[in-house]
């Protein structure tokens, strides 16, 4: 997914706007993640609502399907990425103290990777049945 965003940013720089700043680059990446999140959110929400009344075992059976688990992971991963991108903008714009700025940026990155790892292992345990 990160490669797709990097490719799209490069294509926009090459063909549409020469000399984009880092802020514009960040803006483009955040818009790409937003566009991809729209259908994933619809798919995840409809799936969630459809399976809302099911019990634990039935829900486990739903997420044992590799495609369903993959789409769920993709939804959460992109949601965390989009949150990370937005938090970076807030940190860059509103945190003036360099030490706090650095700590918050690292915390944001650790949160992003940590949540992705948790979701990946949770869904892997369901799909692989261990």
Image (spheres, rainbow, N blue to C red):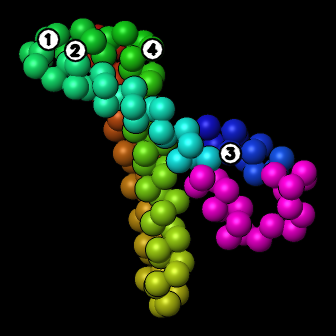
Classed neighbour count for the residue bearing mark 2: other residues with Cα under 10 Å, few (<14), some (14–19), many (≥20) = some
Q: Which residue is mark 4?
A: 67
Q: Is residue 116 left or right of residue 88?
A: left
Q: Is residue 8 left or right of residue 102?
A: right
| Res 57 label | 1
Marks 1,4: beta carbons within 8 A: no
| Res 36 label | none
**Magenta stretch containing residue 17, yes or no?**
yes
Specify whether residue 121 is in view: no
Towards the viewer: 97 or 45 = 45
Residue at 40 percent of width and 35 percent of height:
41
Q: Which residues are magenta?
A: 12-31
Query: Which-is-in-front pick, marks 3 and 2?
Result: 3
Answer with mark 4 or mark 3, whichever residue precedes in sequence. 3
Q: Which residue is mark 3?
A: 5
Marks 3 and 2 sit apart, C-alpha to C-alpha, by 32 Å
- Location of residue 110 with respect to 104 vertically, above or below: above
Residue at 10 percent of width and 19 percent of height:
53
Q: Is residue 19 left or right of residue 46?
A: right
Q: What x and y, as percent, mark residue 47?
A: 30, 22
Marks 2,1: beta carbons within 8 A: yes
Q: Which residue is mark 2?
A: 60
Marks 1 and 3 sit apart, C-alpha to C-alpha, by 37 Å
Q: Which quadrant would residue 13 be assigned to in this image?
A: bottom right
Name the element at disc 1: helix
Q: What x and y, as percent, mark residue 49?
A: 22, 25
Answer with mark 1 or mark 3, whichever residue precedes in sequence. 3
Q: What x and y, as percent, mark residue 78?
A: 48, 42
Name the element at disc 4: helix
Classed neighbour count for the residue bearing mark 4: other residues with Cα under 10 Å, few (<14), some (14–19), many (≥20) = few
Q: Which quadrant would residue 77 be assigned to in this image?
A: top left
Marks 2 and 1 sit apart, C-alpha to C-alpha, by 5 Å
């Amino acid at each position: 997914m990160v490669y797709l965003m990097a490719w799209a940013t490069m294509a926009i720089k090459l063909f549409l706007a020469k000399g984009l700043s880092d802020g514009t680059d960040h803006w483009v990446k955040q818009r790409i993640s937003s566009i991809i999140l729209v259908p994933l959110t619809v798919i995840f929400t409809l799936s969630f609502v459809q399976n809302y009344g099911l019990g634990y075992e039935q829900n486990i059976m739903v997420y044992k399907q590799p495609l369903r688990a993959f789409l769920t992971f993709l939804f959460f991963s992109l949601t965390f990425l989009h949150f990370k991108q937005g938090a970076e903008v807030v940190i860059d714009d509103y945190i003036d103290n360099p030490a706090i700025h650095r700590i918050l940026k690292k915390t944001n990155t650790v949160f992003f990777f940590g949540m992705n790892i948790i979701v990946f292992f949770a869904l892997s345990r369901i799909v692989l049945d261990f």
